[in-house]
Amino acid sequence: MLPVALEFADQRSDSAVRVCRLCVRLWVGPTEAARHLNGTVTADQLAFVDRRHVDIADLRAASADLINLYLQFELVGQWGTGEAAAADGTHFEIYEDNLLAEHHIRYGKTGGIAYRHIADNYIALFSRFIACGTYEATYILDALLENLSDLHPKRVHADTHGQSAAVFGLAYLLGIELMPRIRSWRKLNLYRSERCEYSLRRDPLFSGTVNWSLIREHYDLFMQLALAIQSGALAPSAVLARINSYSTRNRFALALQELGKAVRTTFMLDWIMNDSMRRAVRKCTTKNRATPQVCETPRLRRARSVAIERSIGSREGHRLQRIGRQRRRVAERCRSNASAPCA
């Protein structure tokens, strides 16, 4: 007689694979899923399918299928059009022996950053787990190009960490409208298109002039870069990480920054003059910040808190466990001798 795992592998049941994908998407373990499925599949079968058949590509495809089905509901259209998405990172505490675990200076805790892209109709399009200290703007364009669903936003919002001159330039080449909510926007430099006599009165607003000759010099490379990213040969995060590591003498990196300066200046002028645009950007970024708290059920929140308390090397977790054991011993003594006073 074959073991349960091998017997199930020989059957090649597609329904069990779909059930396993759904369980992974809903953060439900094999034991909990088998209990709710009333004996349709066992926990061993779901665990075997997870180890054998589920990988990153399957999870992305399953996520796209769920998004496409969810878009068919009429309620989704009442929340938003899906033309815009907001990107933001959320700090999660993880085990200290994890390869991505680092100490975050801002939060003062050890963990990682879950970088999410949420559409304006509250649909989670893409998520990536990055290490603490990583510049979030490097991964802001990946979600819009690696998204496999029928929802394709062309406008992305972010906070101060989701923008830079190079990101503005690359987003413009890819046809993506970057509209971040910048905290200290008054400290940013504005650049004029050209210096002429009729703009002398507005010169105090600008700190320099865009180098259009440098941009024209690298026009062919810009087109090749955009085509390579659109075809999937390159990832925007890889390009931005490479450009950020370049020295100030690299002319291609300087040309992309010059293009980004021109695009960001146009955006900042619209931001100052257009009050409705400021409200729209704040509204979309607020949706992103509210989504993790809305999607997290009390059961998941309780399970995550237990995992944090039991994390390796966590002194607070050991202290709480020690206090719990002491309380249980006191309660057992009180029940064994009901007549004894309980302090």
Image (cartoon, rainbow, N blue to C red):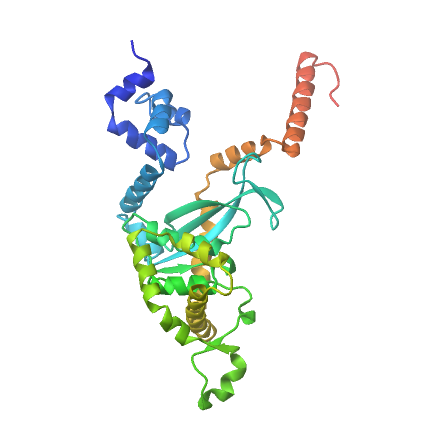
Q: Residue placed at 37% from the left, 68% from the top? A: 218
Which residue is nearer to you in this view: 257 or 69?
257
Look at the image and tell me in which quarter the C terminus lies.
top right
Where on the picture, by quarter, is residue 196? Answer: bottom left
Q: Is residue 95 depicted above or below 161 in this figure? A: above
Which residue is nearer to you in this view: 129 or 152?
129
Look at the image and tell me in which quarter the N terminus lies.
top left
- Residue 181: x and y in percent read 48, 63
Q: Residue placed at 29% from the left, 58% from the top? A: 227
The reply to whether residue 39 is visible in this rendering is yes
Instruction: Please give the count of numbered marks on the rendered protein.
Output: 0
- Furthest toward the front, the residue is 249
Taking the image as shown, residue 227 lies to the left or right of residue 310, namely left
The reply to whether residue 280 is visible in this rendering is no
- Residue 21: x and y in percent read 33, 34
- Residue 341: x and y in percent read 75, 18
Where on the picture, by quarter, is residue 230? Answer: bottom left
Which residue is nearer to you in this view: 315 or 37?
315
- Furthest toward the bottom, the residue is 197
- Residue 79: x and y in percent read 36, 55
